[in-house]
Image: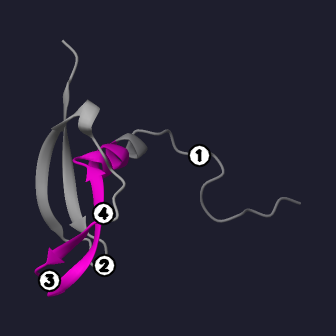
Amino acid sequence: MPIDEVSIVRMCGACRSEIETITVKKDNMRLFTDDAVWCEGCQCDQPEVRDIAGRHASIQAEQQNYPESPTSGPPQLVR
């Protein structure tokens, strides 16, 4: 059965503190917005930033599974 709903995290655009997590249907998903939200940390209205919940953790987990590059590390001089 396909996944029809997605969890969206609403964050402050200035300090990136999480304001709330909402679940919406994929058809109604909107990540780009010009709305302003009240941020408790900043104590004022700030631009809203939306992102899919768990995206950053998923990216980090995948990057840790990448094979190590043979060219990683400081450059070696070969004569």
Please report contact status of discs 3 and 4: CB closer than 8 Å, yes or no: no
Determine the residue located farthest toward the right in the rendered image. Answer: 79
Of the two numbered discs 2 and 4 on the same chain, state the one appearing first in sequence.
2
Please report contact status of discs 1 and 4: CB closer than 8 Å, yes or no: no
Q: Mark 1 points at which residue?
A: 69
Q: Mark 2 points at which residue?
A: 14
Residue at image location 27% in from the left, 40% down from the top: 29
Distance from the alpha carbon under mark 2 to that under mark 4:
9 Å
Report the amino acid beneath label 2: Ala
Q: Mark 4 points at which residue?
A: 49
Please report contact status of discs 2 and 3: CB closer than 8 Å, yes or no: no
Q: Nearer the viewer, residue 45 or 42?
A: 45
Report the amino acid beneath label 4: Val
For the residue labelled by badge 4, is the local secondary structure a helix, a strand or a loop? strand
The range drawn in magenta is 35-61
Left or right: where 62 falls relative to 12: right
Above or below, 65 relative to 48? above
Q: Position of residue 22 (x, y in %)?
A: 12, 48
Disc 3: CA contacts within 10 A as few (<14), some (14-19) or many (>=20): few
Q: Mark 3 points at which residue?
A: 41
**Colour pattern of the rendering:** one colour
Q: Foreground mark, 1 or 4? A: 4
Disc 1: CA contacts within 10 A as few (<14), some (14-19) or many (>=20): few
Quarter holding the C terminus is bottom right
Q: Nearer the viewer, residue 35 or 62?
A: 35
Left or right: where 56 falls relative to 17: right
Question: Is residue 57 inside the magenta stretch?
Answer: yes
Distance from the alpha carbon under mark 1 to that under mark 4:
34 Å
For the residue labelled by badge 3, is the local secondary structure a helix, a strand or a loop? loop
Above or below, 36 relative to 70? below
Q: Where is residue 51 in the image (x, y as percent from the top left)?
A: 29, 53
Above or below, 59 relative to 48? above
